[in-house]
Every structure is written in C-alpha cells, then in structure tokens.
Amino acid sequence: MKRITILASMLIMVASVLTSCRETKEKETIVKEVEVEKKVDTPKEEREGILERTAKEVDKEVNEEINEEIEKIGDDN
C-alpha cells in the first residue's frame, strides 16, 4: 500500500510538472494602419490665419480714413 501511494504521488507530481511547463500558443494579432487623405473644401477666408484677416480689416479702415481726409482737403486741380 505504501508503494502505491508513493507511486501515485510521484505520478501526480510528474503530471503537474509536465502540464505546467507546456507553452501555450498565443494568437497573433495583426494591426494595419491605414492613412486616408480627404480633401476638404474650405472657404478662402478660413484658409487665412487670424493675423491675415485682422490685417485686411485694419487695412480697409485705414484706407477709408485716408479717403475721408483726401475728400476733406479737396481736389486742388
């Protein structure tokens, strides 16, 4: 009886050692990166930066003031 228990315990130990050392197969995951170029139609005003738009507005105001001063002076010819 003693031999049977020793053999059974050795068999259990061997079985547990062999099963714990097995390599498990891992599934390979493939990830693909895809770049998509999309042409976006933006109005011309939005293509310009804020500095360009502000400069145009200031330029219009300055031109109006210059025209007013020219009209005040009058035409010398």
Image (cartoon, rainbow, N blue to C red):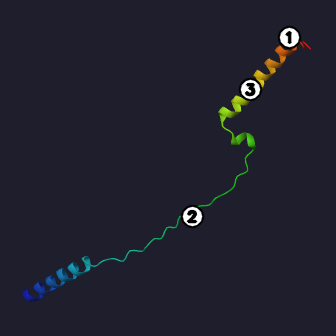
Percent of width and height locating residue 2: 7, 86
Which residue type does callout 3 highlight? Asp
Marker disc for residue 59:
3
Tell me whether circle 3 and circle 2 mark residues in contact (CB < 8 Å). Answer: no
Marker disc for residue 73:
1
Residue at label 2?
A: 34
Q: Nearer the viewer, mark 1 or mark 3?
A: 1
Mark found first going from the N terminus, 1 or 3: 3
| SS class, disc 2 | loop
Distance from the alpha carbon under mark 1 to that under mark 2: 66 Å
Left or right: residue 61 versus residue 5 is right
| SS class, disc 1 | helix
Which residue type does callout 2 highlight? Val
Left or right: residue 25 versus residue 2 is right
Q: Examine the rendered structure and indicate whether residue 49 appears above or below residue 40.
A: above
**Quadrant of residue 51 within the rendered picture:** top right
Q: Examine the rendered structure and indicate whether residue 61 appears above or below residue 22.
A: above
**Quadrant of residue 60 within the rendered picture:** top right
